[in-house]
Image: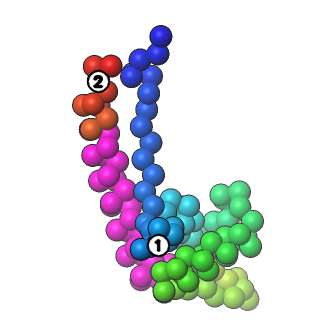
Amino acid sequence: MKTANDLRLTVTLRLLDDEGQRRFGPGVASLLEEVREKRSLRAAAGAMGMAYSKAWRIVRDAEEALGYKLLNSTIGGRHGGGAALTEEAEALLSAYQALREEVAAFARERFETRFRDL
């Protein structure tokens, strides 16, 4: 017989608008984290096993929903192109990551309290 010790909790944090439409969540956050690390949307998409066109669509959709740019891009040339997060994207990602950690810690504690004796 399975017990609560066999269960695990997963918390997914998504930011929604007033109509309940998704505006920011784990997928966009992961993509921005990869761009921050690799300094390239193409490299970030590749690392995530995602088509470059899909990565651009995700970024454009998020920018439109949020009302500000998330990436500053430079076109390739002698030194190649690249991408960097805007100040707004850095602030958003930082706030999202902090909230995600806080919510996860709270949820883990509550899960352990509620399910420990089952």
Residue at coordinates 65% horizontally, 58% vertically from top-left?
Answer: 48
Q: Is residue 104 magenta?
A: yes
Q: Please rate how many residues cluster around mark 1, counting C-alpha atoms within 10 Å: few if below 14, some from 14 to 19, many from 20.
A: few
Residue at coordinates 29% horizontally, 53% vertically from top-left?
Answer: 102
Which tag, 1 or 2, sits closer to the chain's start?
1
- 35, 79: nearer the viewer: 35
- 47, 60: nearer the viewer: 60
Labelled disc at residue 19 = 1
Instruction: Tell me where the magenta segment starts and ends, as one range.
Output: 85-108
Residue 78 image position (x, y, % from top left): 73, 88
| Res. 111 image quadrant | top left
- Residue 105 against residue 71 in the figure, above or below: above
- Residue 40 against residue 69 in the figure, above or below: above
Residue 32 image position (x, y, % from top left): 53, 69
Q: Is residue 24 in sight in this rendering?
A: no
Residue 114 image position (x, y, % from top left): 27, 30
The residue identified by callout 2 is 116
- Residue 4 against residue 66 in the figure, above or below: above
Farthest residue in the top direction? 1
